[in-house]
Image (cartoon, coloured by chain):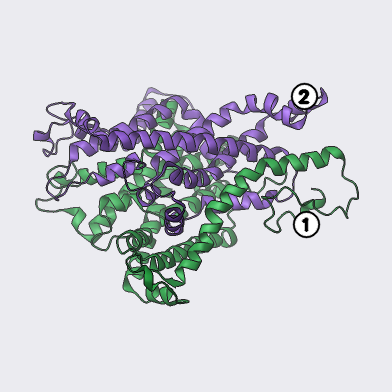
Chain colours: A green, B purple
Amino acid sequence: MTIDSENSGAAPTVATPSPEPKHSAKSKMSDGKAAERRLGLWLVAPAAILMIAVTAYPVVYAVWLSLQRYDLRFPDQRKFVWFDNYVSVLTDGYWWQAFAVTTSITVVSVVIEFVLGLTIALVMHRTIVGKGLVRTVVLIPYGIVTVAAAYSWYYAWTPGTGYLANLLPDGSAPLTDQIPSLAIIVLAEVWKTTPFMALLLLAGLALVPDDLLKAAQVDGAGAWTRLVRIILPLMKPAILVALLFRTLDAFRIFDNIYVLTKGANDTGSVSILGYDNLFKAFNLGIGSAISVLIFVCVALIAFVFIKLFGASAPGSDTEGR
Amino acid sequence: MTVTPRLKISWSVVNLLVLLYALVPVLWIASLSFKPAGTIKDGKFIPEKWTLDNYRGIFDTSAFTSALINSIGIGLISTVIAVVIGTMAAYAIARLDFPGKKLLVGVALLIAMFPQISLVSPLFDIERRLGLFDTWAGLILPYITFALPLAIYTLSAFFKEIPWELEKAAQMDGATPGQAFRKVVAPLAAPGIVTAGILVFIFCWNDLLFAISLTSTERSITAPAAIANFTGASQFEEPTGSIAAAAMVITIPIIIFVLFFQRRIVAGLTSGAVKG
């Protein structure tokens, strides 16, 4: 693009419309060009200011809080303790327990969602009857309030009350044991989010040219070969974006666990742990340290996806119009 | 490929499986909400007796009605503000050349991926000191912020589809860039704006974490948080019927959106996600 391409990714001055970028490279900007820049900056200013005020500042503040001993029950003992909170969290079994639970839920549910989502995407793409109906109904799990859906699963598995619990042998209460609880949490998570995955994959499927598939079929490639050799490779960008979004989303899992088990029987995720430290133990220092650690984990996951797998972040191509 | 009746039947069976997948949990909570107290624990998928008592019950007290009003109010205000601000930003990103564009897109993406829990502890502390804790504004602010990336992506994808020439033509005829935006682009972008609005509203409507962390009373608690708090005093007295009825009430708007705006929601969700 034009002159500002070298400093367009620079300093956090997005929010302020004032500083004119350097005029050196091409001496004079036309009036129209300058007006366009001014308008652009004014138009993005509210969004930029709001996003920075409500996230960047609190994040910095969270880091600051995480370096203090700050228990709301004993506010007088507030004190700067450097990394003591991090040491407490990282040497504590609870964090690693929650981390293991979160990672397992994330990996298992994203894998299931991918397989199931791809299947549903293929059904939506190929079906010859009721295409609109399928696409409409599949949106219900996506749109439904997680709490409402979680209660549906909760009562389905409540002994006596639930149609699913009644299929189990007498006396079993799946939501009181760790492994069955985790399985139900994964089920609830998968049910709710697979449609989103399926829609992202469907958009990728639409990019696979039919001619290519026909040609492969003529050449004798079976359905499986066409899927693995043609469809999946061509869908790679869509797949990576879908996996990236869902992995980050699954790692933040909170609502389903909050309703289904409240984190009892070692089923709490890191988000549940952070919440409990804040609102049950009222420990802002420890809670903030956990918050920062979760943030770091999420950043690492995003980094791995983007750098190692080459997932292209959506919107990253907006520069070229 | 010829369409034989057999092929049609097998596809219908496959479709039916997908429909069952999507609908069974919703039908189950609906079934629970219509069961009278006496048979609610019978474990039958279809109620033997039907009643509206559970619905009457939740609207009798202010606990759920005020939460519902809070949810609607907070959701609508957040949606309007996020869509207006998002429209401005998306237009600039899609159409104008200005410094810091990449940075803005990057920040929006970061926020889309941001773990909400990481904001809860600082926001809790900040809002208590600013007097925003347990107010509508205290929830609207984080909702707008987390909805903005969604709005910006959906809208900028739509804006890019709008033919450039029309805007150019308007400017040729003497319209300023601002007028070209208001008079030409905005009407063309209306479908995109509706889509963004629906997605943003669904997002705000769905939130639990901010709602249980940043509110505490009927003044501002939202429906999902209120429902999660319904859980009775003792483990044996769970208000199953009330929870099921309340869950149905907050599910109905979503089903209406889905039925009327299916195409737009799909387009909005997938916009921006498939570029490689």
- Name above or below for residue A174 compared with residue B201: below
Residue annotated with mark 2? B170
Left-right relation of A214 to A195: right
The secondary element bearing badge 2 is classed as helix
- Name above or below for residue B250 compared with residue B173: below
- CA separation in Å, label 2 and label 1: 32 Å
Do the dots labelled 2 and 1 sit on one chain? no
Front residue of B259 and B102: B102
Badge 2: few (under 14), some or many (20 or more) residues near its Cα, within 10 Å?
some
Left-right relation of A39 to B38: right
At label 1, the amino acid type is Glu
Q: Residue at x 41, y 26 (%)?
A: B259
Residue annotated with mark 1? A6
Q: Residue at x 20, y 59 (%)?
A: A177
Q: Residue at x 47, y 25 (%)?
A: B2
> Looking at this rendering, what residue extends furthest in the right direction?
A27
Badge 1: few (under 14), some or many (20 or more) residues near its Cα, within 10 Å?
few
Q: Position of residue A153 (x, y in %)?
A: 26, 44
Q: Quadrant of residue B42?
A: top left
